[in-house]
Image (tube, rainbow, N blue to C red):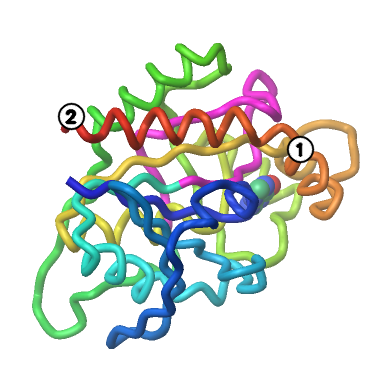
């Protein structure tokens, strides 16, 4: 069993960026792939985080992981909270998602309609391991995917909060493609801010990411436990 990881800025300084790196090419495009003992990692924003969310080549990334033998994929995502009680610094393991626009697919010729699912056992493993580390984790919830790169307007957030717990720009695309390839998939979200207008404080993304980049050690520790735990799947 090879565990796959796909992540963003929160993993840029992790040991997963220090794996054996390779620039891979598949029919969808080029992908940076890192490999270590029992895991394969794709940094979705590239080497130094320079690929913006709306330009990520999701199809190339997920197929690259599959071609490296990944059967179980964990996606790590930065999100904004749509609930006052879900606070920045906490983790969320969503069990569903909404994405109405720009749905990527590998099935452009065949008439195949997958039913999206997220892996409950993998989700449970992440919640359990987070608990063991004493991290605050919310089990379940819906991720709403917006297209980015801009943040949402206050009015959009007022609308979205009736339907989801967290908002971000990448998870639904990756979850859908992983599902189309038959990979088992679960997501781990770091809550980095309250969504726009949810609290009085001004929302500034640079500021949010600056604050979020400190204290990532526990997230990396959690992923190590999850990768280890996946070996028993
Ligand atoms: N909105 C969209 N994507 C995000 C946010 C947000 O508030 N925070 C982190 N990623």
Location of residue 144 in the rendering, given as x and y in whole percent from the top left corner:
50, 47
Which residue: 66% across, 72% down?
A: 50
In magenta stretch: residue 190: no
For disc 1, the neighbor class at 10 Å (few under 14, some 14 to 19, many from 20) is few
**For residue 70, which quarter of the picture?**
bottom left
Label placed on residue 39: none
Q: Which mark is residue 214?
A: 1
Q: Please indicate whether residue 195 sits to the left or right of residue 63 in the image.
A: right
The residues colored magenta run 76-100
Quarter occupied by the C terminus: top left
Residue 49 position in % (x across, y down):
65, 66
Disc 2 or 1, which lies upstream in sequence?
1
Out of 58 and 167, give the one closest to the viewer. Answer: 58
SS at circle 2: loop
- Per the rendering, the mark at residue 232 is 2
In the image, taking residue 149 as reference, residue 32 lies left or right, namely: left
């Amino acid at each position: 069993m090879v565990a796959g990881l796909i992540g963003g800025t929160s993993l840029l300084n992790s040991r997963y960026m220090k794996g054996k790196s390779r620039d891979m090419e598949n029919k969808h495009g080029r992908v940076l792939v890192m490999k270590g003992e029992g895991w394969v990692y794709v940094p979705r924003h590239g080497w130094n985080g320079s690929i913006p969310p709306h330009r990520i080549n999701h199809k190339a990334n997920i197929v690259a992981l599959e071609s490296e033998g990944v059967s179980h994929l964990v996606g790590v995502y930065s999100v904004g909270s749509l609930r006052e009680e879900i606070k920045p610094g906490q983790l969320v393991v969503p069990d569903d998602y909404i994405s109405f626009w720009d749905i990527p697919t590998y099935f452009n010729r065949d008439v195949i309609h997958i039913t999206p699912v997220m892996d409950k056992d993998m989700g449970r493993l992440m919640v359990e391991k987070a608990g063991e580390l004493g991290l605050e984790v919310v089990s379940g919830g819906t991720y709403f995917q917006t297209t980015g790169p801009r943040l949402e307007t206050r009015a959009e957030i007022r609308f979205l909060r009736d339907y989801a717990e967290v908002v971000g720009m990448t998870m639904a695309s990756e979850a859908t493609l992983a599902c189309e390839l038959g990979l088992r998939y679960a997501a781990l979200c770091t809550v980095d801010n309250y969504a726009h207008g949810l609290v009085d404080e001004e929302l500034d993304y640079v500021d949010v990411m600056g604050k979020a980049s400190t204290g990532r050690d526990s997230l990396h520790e959690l992923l190590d436990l999850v990768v280890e735990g996946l070996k028993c799947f």
